[in-house]
Image: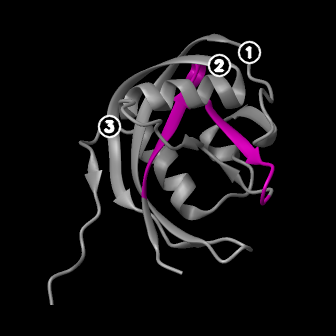
Amino acid sequence: PQLVWLPGVSAGVFGDGGRGLVAQRADNRRWTVISGIPDPGEQPADCAVREVYEEAGVHCVAERVVLVRAGEQVAYPNGDACQFMDVTFRCRAVGGEARVNDDESVQVGWFEVDALPPMHERQVFRIKQALSDEPAWFETTPAE
């Protein structure tokens, strides 16, 4: 099968006190930042805000882009394969209550950055980059 290239967004959401919002996915049980695929014609920041509410019941405001990079290839049991171009936003929680709000997650919660549940280093990097005041980070391939 041919590799499918898809747009994706991620949201590093922070509430009062700097705690980050993460979810445990229903499909693979991994802890991640909230993420999703924009609907046709949907702006990436709007998608991030929508996904956070749909998945975790939290209203937020996208503040800035903190990371842009291609993800790793993902293979599905049915043989499909895709790769996401991810744009990560720093988002500020402005309302709602963190809860499992759809069938994509089994748990959601607020965590201190130094007490995150076990998660892939790429997820931790997204959270730390969103918390920093550094300019947006763009991954590049080293020149040969």
- Dots 2 and 1: beta carbons under 8 Å? yes
Residue lying farthest top? 95
Q: Amino acid at mark 2?
A: Val
Looking at the rendering, the stretch of residues picked out in magenta corresponds to: 6-28
Q: Which residue is mark 3?
A: 65
| Most foreground residue, 89 or 116 | 89
Quadrant where the C terminus is found in the figure: bottom left
Q: Amino acid at mark 3?
A: Val
- Dots 1 and 3: beta carbons under 8 Å? no
SS at badge 2: strand
Q: Earlier in the sequence, mark 2 or mark 3?
A: 2
Residue in the image at 38% along x and 39% along y: 132
- Quarter-wise, where is residue 65 in the image? top left
Q: Which residue is mark 2?
A: 58
Residue in the image at 64% along x and 33% along y: 21
- Per the picture, the main secondary structure of the magenta-coloured stretch is strand
Residue lying farthest right? 106
Q: Earlier in the sequence, mark 2 or mark 1?
A: 2
Residue 45 vs residue 11: left or right?
left
Q: Which residue is mark 1?
A: 97
Real-space Cα distance between discs 1 and 3? 24 Å
Residue 17 vs residue 89: left or right?
right
Q: Is residue 67 magenta?
A: no
SS at badge 3: strand
Residue lying farthest left? 143
Real-space Cα distance between discs 2 and 3? 19 Å
Q: Earlier in the sequence, mark 1 or mark 3?
A: 3
| Most foreground residue, 40 or 65 | 40
Residue 95: x, y in percent? Answer: 62, 9
Residue 117: x, y in percent? Answer: 74, 50
